Amino acid sequence: MPTDPLSPEEARRYSRHLVLKGMGGAGQQALKAARVLVIGAGGLGSPVIAYLAAAGVGTIGIIDDDSVSLSNLQRQVLHTTGGIGKAKVTSAEDFAGALNPHVKIVSLNVRLTPENAAGIFAEYSLVLDGTDNLATRRAVAATCEALGLPLVSGAVSMFDGQVTIFVPAGPRFGDLYPEDADDADLPSCEATGILGPLTGVIGTLMAMEAIKLITGIGEPLIGRVLTYDGKGGRFSEFSY
């Protein structure tokens, strides 16, 4: 379905994109036509949602069944003290709508399961996963693979984080995370803590990769993992 042309207000809003070589009007129209699903409105979801909304992604679905708590606010920058107790998807929708009224936000205040994932994902052309447990991440990856959807995947722990992309016919989730890996073997945020800005670094990189996939700009992180050592201030990369 053709996308409506940019309005004069949108042209002013996205002017730095429109003059950007490689992006221009075609890239901005691709963003406007895109339907993107963000799984999790927490530490990683916050910068992802903020930057995709600011960039003008036409439809952003947000799925999360949690509510805002005080301990979230150290890193989950979509939410505020006044929003404690509010559903995270509602808080995220309020933020994104205030930032860019040209973006349609679809709030899904439900728990993602292997049973409901396919029906939800089928409405979108790209998925970004910011969840914090392997069981959900496996279900997300399996559903994306079954539906032929690209998946931008981010993960954080303590001072470190990583980003990669899974695409149809490319390296699979199981190539990176062995089947015998279990959540019990991984440190939890509640037990070990996490430095707030780390989620901003990784979530922003996830948004960057999503925009690259939508517009065709650059070389996405397909089959490559970009890692960030927050304490050392170093990025590195490996293939899988």
Image (cartoon, grey):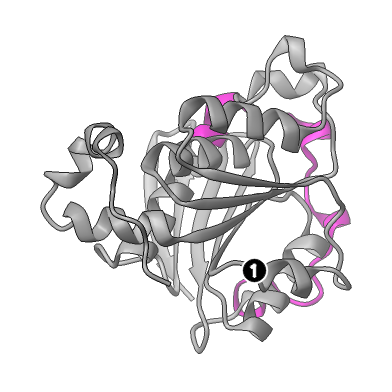
- Residue drawn at x 49%, y 31% as measured from the top left: 231
Q: Is residue 157 above or below residue 195?
A: below
Name the residue furthest top: 82
Q: Is residue 105 above or below residue 200?
A: below
On screen, residue 212 versus residue 148, left or right, reads: left
Magenta segment: does it hold 165?
no
The local crowd at label 1, few if under 14, some if 14 to 19, many if 20 or more residues have their Cα within 10 Å, is few
Amino acid type at circle 1 is: Glu
Disc 1: which residue: 123
Residue 46 in percent (x, y) is at 59, 35
Q: Nearer the viewer, residue 189 or 81?
A: 81
- Residue drawn at x 50%, y 35% as measured from the top left: 50
Q: Nearer the viewer, residue 3 or 219?
A: 3
- Residue drawn at x 64%, y 68% as measured from the top left: 123
Magenta segment: does it hold 179?
yes
Q: Is residue 194 above or below residue 237?
A: above
Camera sees residue 194 = no
Residue 97 sits in which quadrant? top right
Residue 223 in percent (x, y) is at 45, 74
On screen, residue 134 versus residue 201, left or right, reads: right
| SS at circle 1 | loop
Q: Is residue 27 above or below residue 157?
A: below
On screen, residue 11 versus residue 58, left or right, reads: left
- Residue drawn at x 28%, y 47% as measured from the top left: 6
Camera sees residue 65 = yes
Residue 105 in percent (x, y) is at 61, 44
Residue 91 in percent (x, y) is at 71, 28
Highlighted range, magenta: 174-200
Residue 73 sits in which quadrant? top right
- The image shows a total of numbered marks equal to 1
Q: Nearer the viewer, residue 161 or 59?
A: 59
